[in-house]
Amino acid sequence: MQDTQVAGALATTAAELDAQDELAFLRRRFHLPDEEVYCESTCLGPLPVNVPQEMARTVAQEWGRGLLSSWWEAGWWDAPRRVGDKVGRLVGAAPGRTVVGDSTTVQLFNALVAAARLRPERRTLLAPTTQFTTVRYITDSVARLLGLRVRRVAPAELSAALGAEGDDVAVLVHEAVDFRTGEAHDLAGLTRAAHAAGVVCLWDLSHGAGVLPVGLDVHDVDFAVGCTYKYLCGGPGAPAFLYVNARHQDAVDQPLPGWTGHAEPFAMRDVYHPAEGIDRGRIGTPSILSMIALEHALDAYEGVTIEQIGARGRSLTGFFLTCADELLTPQGVGVATPREPQSRAGHMAVRHPDAEDIIGRLRKRGVYADRRPPDLMRFGLHPLFCTHREVLRVVTEITEVIA
Ligand SMILES: *Cc1c(COP(=O)(O)O)cnc(C)c1O
């Protein structure tokens, strides 16, 4: 086929897929630019339309008028747990297993130490070589703190490592989705392999939450953490979440025992006695304004299941592959994201030695994406609002810029 015929056929397919899309209405729940294509939910999700008025109300009424009483009367005190349950619905967690607060980095530290303390006789933390910076730094620091060693192997070798040397591994710490390539790892299979070796697993869901079904309860995951300002659109610096499996909750001994996680926070005891259940995952006073923004941002997910969202996302990433096969492969440009639907998540990654320059030029053409050194460009295709037409436009613009 001629190039123009290829482009025409892809445009027809995009229009058909968008016309059949039963979730197209979700796009209206976000403030999005008219002409630009926003593919940076890998770093910061866009603003949901209902958040500004809810924030204005919270500030004027709850803070401005309610003052201290708002901790009780406006439900601020219960917000970490209430908003935690709202995130929990999207990661397959029953109520009472997820709490929101602090940053992902802090939650990782807390969860990793707590997980390692469940296996005091074991000396190893197992992780893939592909760890995101903050996960790597925290893993190394926790190992130093607790006198453990860190063993890193290629993601494909983790199962074998668990089988061969799992009896010395305290914790497997892993990201559900690779921040570079967008590969969705086998959370269910690795969790099973870890449990067979008596290993506790801690999953960082930062690039998976709100994009695909992770099924924390179904897969019996021990601990999980994740950030809420990427696909969950909770706003800049929105608080992270912590999930703790019900069977561990009463055994959790977290290293940052703040007063709000105490069984009787207002009794002002001299000795820390943790609250029952997920409340012991609380640390200090939560950042209420950010948490309220997140609470209302999550309304963008109302009325749809994470399975529906995951299917819509796979349609977008699959169409990206179709477009890339037709338009990028002939230019010698490779896609770094795996092809199998179950191995794709929210973003598609494309390799090119001039990634930085290309991303800069795409921006001038109205396509907002980001890059990761040395040669990766990331295109976050948010499953709530991105369209197939936009996917085609993105791939077409990449092709033109490279040409
Ligand atoms: C984005 C991201 C984080 C974010 O950590 P912060 O403490 O919020 O800066 C953590 N882990 C992973 C895997 C991420 O992708």
Image (cartoon, rainbow, N blue to C red):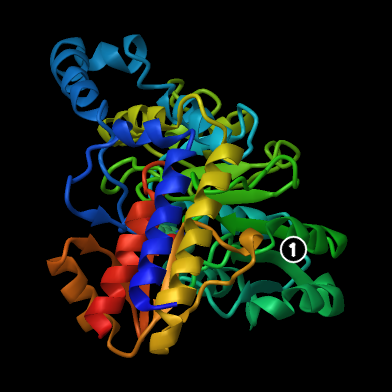
Q: Quadrant of ligand 1?
A: bottom left
Horizontal arrangement in the rendering, residue 127 relative to residue 357 (left or right): right
Closer to the camera in the image, 228 or 104: 228
Amino acid type of the residue tagged 1 in the rendering:
Leu
Q: What residue do we see at 42% from left, 89% from top?
A: 332
Query: Which residue position is annotated with label 1?
Result: 190
Seen from the viewer's position, the closer of residues 58 and 50 is 50
Residue 184, located in which quarter of the rendered image? bottom right
- Decide if residue 120 is on the left or right side of residue 239: right
Q: Residue at 47% x, 39% y: name it.
A: 21
Please say if 143 is above or below 213.
below
- The image quadrant of residue 275 is top right
**Residue 109 location (% of width, % of height):** 50, 58
The location of residue 187, given as percent across then percent down, is 68, 58
Does the rendering let one see residue 227?
yes
Q: Secondary structure under badge 1? A: helix
Instruction: Judge by depth and name the residue closer to the eye, 30 or 402.
Output: 402
Q: In percent of the image, x 29 and y 82: which residue is there?
A: 355
Which quadrant would the N terminus be assigned to in this image?
bottom left
User: Which of the image's four quarters has the C terminus?
Assistant: bottom left
Which one is in front, 271 or 165? Answer: 165
Residue 6 at x, y percent in the picture: 41, 70
